Image: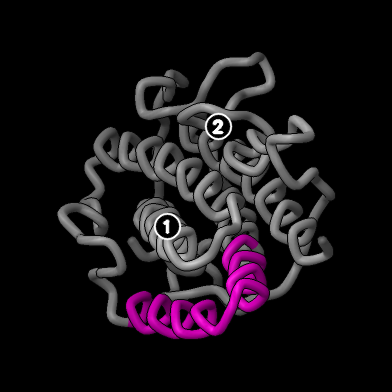
Amino acid sequence: MKARTALGVITAGGVAAVVAIATVPAWAAPMGPGPETGTGAREGHGGHGGHGTRARDGSCLTAAGVVDPSGTLTEAQRSALAANAQEEKLAHDLYAEFANLFETPVFDRIAASETGHLSAVRTLLTRYGVPDPTADREPGRFADPVVQARYDELLVRGRAGEQAALEVGRTVETEDIELLDASLGGLTAPDVQRVYSHLLHASQHHLAAFGRWLTR
C-alpha cells in the first residue's frame, strides 16, 4: 500500500481556502520510540493505541465516535473537509508503503492510526453532504492530480532509504498540522472542531515519533 503527504486548505494568508497542497515545515513535541518501552501505541493514535484518536475523556474517536452536534459549514470549510480526507489517505498510503519496504514499526503503527482518522473524516463528509474524494480510490491513487503528483514525489523520495522515509513522514505530518490549523480557523461546527482538534493532537505525536526514530 502507498501513502503520501499533506494537502489541503491553505492560502497565502493562512486561512481556509482550498489549495491542492500545503508544504511548510513546523515540528512538535517529543515521544518514545517503540512498544518495548510502552510508547508504541503513542506512535499510532496520537498517544493512544487502538482504532481511533482518543479524546481527553478517554473515548475513542472513530467513525462511530463522532457524536458532537453538527453545525454549519461555509463552502471553503466544506472544501477543507474534503482536503483533509485526501490528506489522511495520503498519509496512510505512504506509511503503509514504507512499512512494506522497511523494518521500522513506526510506519505500520501510524498507518493504522491514519485509517481511523480517515474514517472519522468520512463520517463528517457524509453528515454534511460533501462528496468524498477518496471514495473507491485504490492505495496511492488520488482524484486530484496535484495531490497525485505530491504523493508520487514523496513516495520516490521515501523509497531512497529508511532515513529518507522517516524524513518524508516528518514532512507529511508537518503539512498535516498546517492544514488542520488552517481548517480550524473560523470553524464553529462542534463535530468538525472536535475531529480536527484530535487529528491535530495525533499529528503532533506522529511528528515527534518520526523525529525520535531519526535520532535512534
Which SS class for mark 2?
Answer: strand
3D distance between C-alphas at marks 1 and 2: 18 Å
In the image shown, does 145 or 128 lie closer to the viewer?
A: 145
Where does the magenta region start and end? 146-173
- Vertical comparison of 212 with 205: above or below: below
Report whether 187 appears left or right of 35: left
Asked if the stretch drawn in magenta spans residue 162, the answer is: yes
Q: Is residue 14 visible?
A: no
Which SS class for mark 1?
Answer: helix
Give, as a three-letter code, the residue at label 1.
Ala
**Quadrant of the rendered image containing residue 37:** top right
Give, as a three-letter code, the residue at label 2.
Thr
Q: Residue at x 72, y 52 (%)?
A: 209
Residue of label 2? 53
In the image shown, does 102 or 177 lie closer to the viewer?
A: 102
**How crowded is the residue under tag 2: few (<14 C-alpha within 10 Å), some, or many (20+)?**
many
Q: Residue 169: percent from the left, percent from the top? A: 60, 65
Q: Main secondary structure of the magenta part?
A: helix
Q: Residue at x 31, y 41 (%)?
A: 122
Q: Residue 21: percent from the left, percent from the top? A: 48, 75
Report whether 84 appears left or right of 168: left
Asked if the stretch drawn in magenta spans residue 1, the answer is: no
Residue of label 1? 96
Q: Residue at x 46, y 30 (%)?
A: 51
